[in-house]
Image (spheres, rainbow, N blue to C red):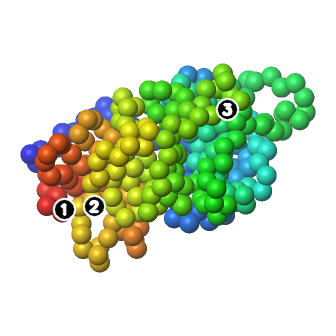
């Protein structure tokens, strides 16, 4: 039972000062896809943020960590941290959907929509280091990707989600709005090619991707609220329908995280609304799925509206 609540006075998740990266976004519309404009490489101490669809701003993570020792007003914007601006070379960019680093922190993926379709551009994260010494004025302003990959033959397809394997730094899964879900392998030390591990076509748009903690399988959530479990070769393992079957309250998946062998954390949202419900799904062999619904992720009981 989750009736009792424990007060933790030394909880370290607290607000620090705000680091202002840019004045305003480019106003690009993302068609119900929530963009993710920040990625962190803990190994190399680099934070990369997007500013519009063709500009990346990087800074040292150590500079941000030092803000925890500051006595300044947390509501005041920090403007003095050293940054580096990189104009990325992409033809006819429309919208930058997501930034992400692989588990080793060496590769930065830039998921982007262009007039030619959906692409992922792979970069060496070290090129974005504030301390990286440049050789020419051209290199100071722009950086070419190590590898460029078109994700769908459909030029109108939009990138939806990309997730790196948490254990294998060469493997990532990516989905596009035409229902294509693929798993790829890319080795930055052999950056002239990329290999397809598996691909599958969905009837519904894949909205989110999550890997198992050991990186051996992945789960996806789609716009119809279904959760599907796959092997990297895109062999289907399990399908779990959404908890509500009422067509007037149809759900879509907007976020997913594989917590443990049988437990998956899912964010559901109404197809016609903006509310978000956090739910833990427990799936075991030969047993029906069980949902634990959290009305409030900070103060919650053990009752589920899905029961």
> Which residue is pictured at 18% across the width and 63% down the height?
305
Query: Relative to residue 45, is residue 223 drawn left or right?
Result: left
The residue furthest right is 137
> Which residue is pictured at 66% across the width and 43% down the height?
149
Please tell me whether mark 1 sits on a helix, a strand or a loop: loop
Quarter holding the N terminus is top left
Please tell me whether mark 2 sits on a helix, a strand or a loop: loop
Say which label, 2 or 1, has the lower sequence index.
Answer: 2
**Looking at the image, is 262 positioned above or below residue 189?**
below
The nearer-to-camera label among 3 and 1 is 3
Question: Pointer 2: what residue?
Answer: 242
Question: Pointer 3: what residue?
Answer: 193
Query: Which quadrant of the figure has residue 268?
Result: bottom left
Q: Tell me how far mark 3 sits from mark 1, CA to CA.
A: 46 Å
> Which residue is pictured at 85% across the width and 32% down the height?
139
Tag 3 and tag 2, C-beta contact below 8 Å: no
Say which label, 3 or 1, has the lower sequence index.
Answer: 3
Question: Pointer 1: what residue?
Answer: 306
Please tell me whether mark 3 sits on a helix, a strand or a loop: loop
């Amino acid at each position: 039972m989750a009736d009792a609540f424990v007060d933790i006075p030394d909880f370290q998740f607290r607000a620090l000062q705000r680091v202002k990266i840019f004045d305003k976004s480019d106003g690009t519309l993302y068609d119900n896809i929530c963009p993710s404009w920040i990625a962190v490489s803990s190994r190399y101490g680099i934070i990369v943020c997007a500013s519009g669809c063709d500009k990346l701003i990087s800074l040292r993570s150590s500079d941000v960590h030092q803000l925890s020792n500051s006595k300044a007003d947390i509501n005041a914007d920090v403007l003095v941290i050293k940054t580096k601006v990189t104009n990325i070379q992409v033809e006819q960019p429309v919208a930058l959907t997501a930034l992400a680093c692989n588990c080793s922190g060496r590769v930065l993926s830039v998921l982007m929509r262009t007039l030619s379709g959906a692409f992922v551009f792979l970069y060496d994260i070290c090129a974005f280091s504030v301390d990286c010494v440049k050789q020419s004025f051209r290199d100071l302003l722009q950086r070419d990707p190590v590898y460029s990959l078109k994700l769908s033959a459909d030029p109108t397809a939009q990138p939806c989600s990309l997730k790196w394997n948490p254990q294998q730094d060469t493997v990532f899964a990516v989905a596009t709005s035409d229902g294509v879900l693929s798993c790829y392998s890319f080795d930055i030390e052999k950056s002239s090619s990329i290999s397809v591990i598996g691909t599958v076509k969905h009837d519904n748009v894949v909205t989110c991707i999550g890997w198992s903690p050991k990186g051996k399988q992945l789960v996806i959530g789609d716009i119809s609220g279904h959760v599907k479990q796959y092997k990297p070769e895109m062999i289907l393992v399990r399908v779990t329908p959404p908890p509500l079957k009422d067509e007037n309250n149809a759900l879509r998946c907007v976020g997913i995280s594989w917590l443990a062998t049988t437990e998956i954390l899912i964010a559901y949202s109404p197809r016609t609304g903006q509310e978000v419900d956090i739910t833990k799904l427990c799936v075991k062999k030969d047993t029906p799925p069980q949902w634990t619904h959290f009305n409030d992720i900070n103060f919650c009981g053990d009752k589920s509206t899905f029961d």
